[in-house]
Image (cartoon, helix red, strand yellow):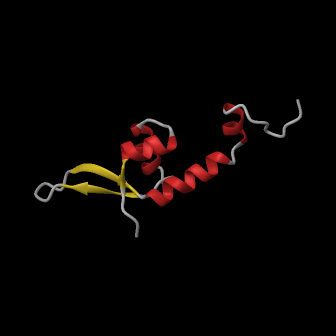
Amino acid sequence: MSDYITTGEAAERLDVAPRTVTRMWRDGTLTGRMLTTRVSKRPYRLLIDPTSVEAVRARQSRSPLTAARKGLPTGAAA
């Protein structure tokens, strides 16, 4: 399996805030793992699977809304 990336790195790749990456992980859009401390088992860092980030990017790039934001033709009749 590929190396994990931080929420900050995932946020940069997706052009969203790190909190949005955390929300996407919680709702299952992104996959990853939460690291915990050894003693108290409290969560302290979320690492995201980069393949799930690339899958989301691929879906975003095909989205008509993304094309419209970039000023590209969407194929919709005006």
Q: Where the N terminus falls, by quadrant? A: bottom left
Q: Residue furthest right?
A: 77
Q: Residue furthest left?
A: 39
Q: Where the C terminus falls, by quadrant? A: top right
Pinpoint residue 16: horizontal percent, then vertical percent: 48, 37
Pinpoint residue 47: horizontal percent, then vertical percent: 34, 54
Residue shown at 49% from the left, 53% from the top: 53
Residue shown at 39% from the left, 45% from the top: 9
Residue shown at 39% from the left, 58% from the top: 32
Pinpoint residue 40: horizontal percent, then vertical percent: 13, 54
Residue shown at 36% from the left, 58% from the top: 4
State the count of labels.
Answer: 0
**Side of 24 where 74 appears, left or right:** right
Q: Residue furthest bottom?
A: 1
- Image: 60 above or below 16: below
**Side of 35 where 62 appears, left or right:** right
- Image: 21 above or below 50: above
Residue 48 occupies quadrant: bottom left
